[in-house]
Image: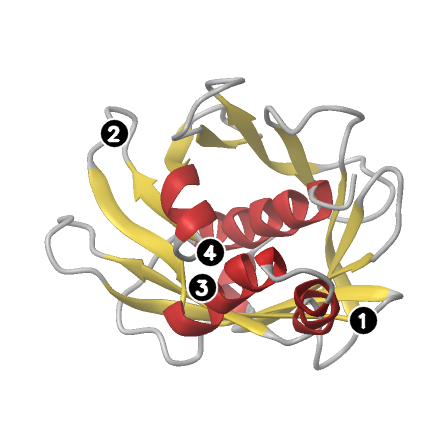
Amino acid sequence: MDYTKYKNLEFRRKYFAFVPQITITDPSTKTVVGFIKMKMWSIKGDIRVYTDKTMQQEIVRIGGRQMVSLKKIYNIFDSTTGAELISIRQNSLKSLFVRNHMDIVSGDNRPYGYIQETSSSLALFRRWIEVIPYLGALIGLFLAFVPQTFEIMYDPQGSSPQLVGRIVHKKNPVVVKMSLDTTMAQVALDPRVCVSAVSLLSILDASKNK
């Protein structure tokens, strides 16, 4: 699957699903260009991205290094060659107390960029509003359906990350969607890494409902 020709992709899954399944489509043609079926209890990291729902051809594999860590690392591998493309490091403390943040790193943990929620104020409001008794829970439920946006930032040299693409996360009580838009990219990043990043975000979000 050649993802370089797709500047916009949509990742869709059901809001309530015991085993998350994500369909990746080209929104302009509604053509399925990828599919993920998460294995049971495998948030440690055994995520496989396939070309379609038959799951006959695997594109990339995402594998986690640590089971328990404040900075879990997910390695991204080319499924054909087995070569490691890059890694994504989840910053759990920053994501929990400030806003969602994941670093794009090399195999030796050298930073090359990051994926980060764009609005720190909205992110903080989401995280802390529920400490207010009763009213906080109601507002928190409402905010769960307010769209989130993320930016993918990257620099091959690791010094001054520039914009690769934007992710918009929308959900309702039936469907959860994440759209990836790379039309405004200032620097190139392997599109398989972008697809893997959105897939990981979607799987981690799905795990919150368990």
Q: What element carries label 2?
A: loop
Kind of residue at disc 3: Leu
Residue assigned mark 3? 124
* Left or right of 59 in this view: 88: left
Q: What residue lies at 20% left-to-right and 51% top-to-bottom? A: 156
* Left or right of 52 in this view: 68: left
Query: Which mark, by number, is residue 191?
Result: 4
Instruction: Assess disc 4: are there few (<14), some (14-19) or many (≥20) residues with their C-alpha within 10 Å of its C-alpha.
Output: some
Instruction: Assess disc 1: are there few (<14), some (14-19) or many (≥20) residues with their C-alpha within 10 Å of its C-alpha.
Output: few
Kind of residue at disc 1: Asn
Q: Is mark 3 on a helix, strand or loop?
A: helix
Instruction: Kindly check if marks 4 and 1 are in contact, taking CB atoms under 8 A apart as contact.
Output: no
Q: In the rendered image, which quarter is residue 50 located in?
A: top right
Distance (Cα) linking label 4 and label 3: 30 Å
Q: Is residue 138 above or below residue 55?
A: below
Q: In this view of the protein, can residue 91 be seen by the observer?
A: no
Q: What residue lies at 78% left-to-right and 68% top-to-bottom? A: 31
Closer to the eye: label 2 or 4:
2
Distance (Cα) linking label 3 and label 1: 21 Å
In the rendered view of the protein, which quadrant contains the C terminus? top right
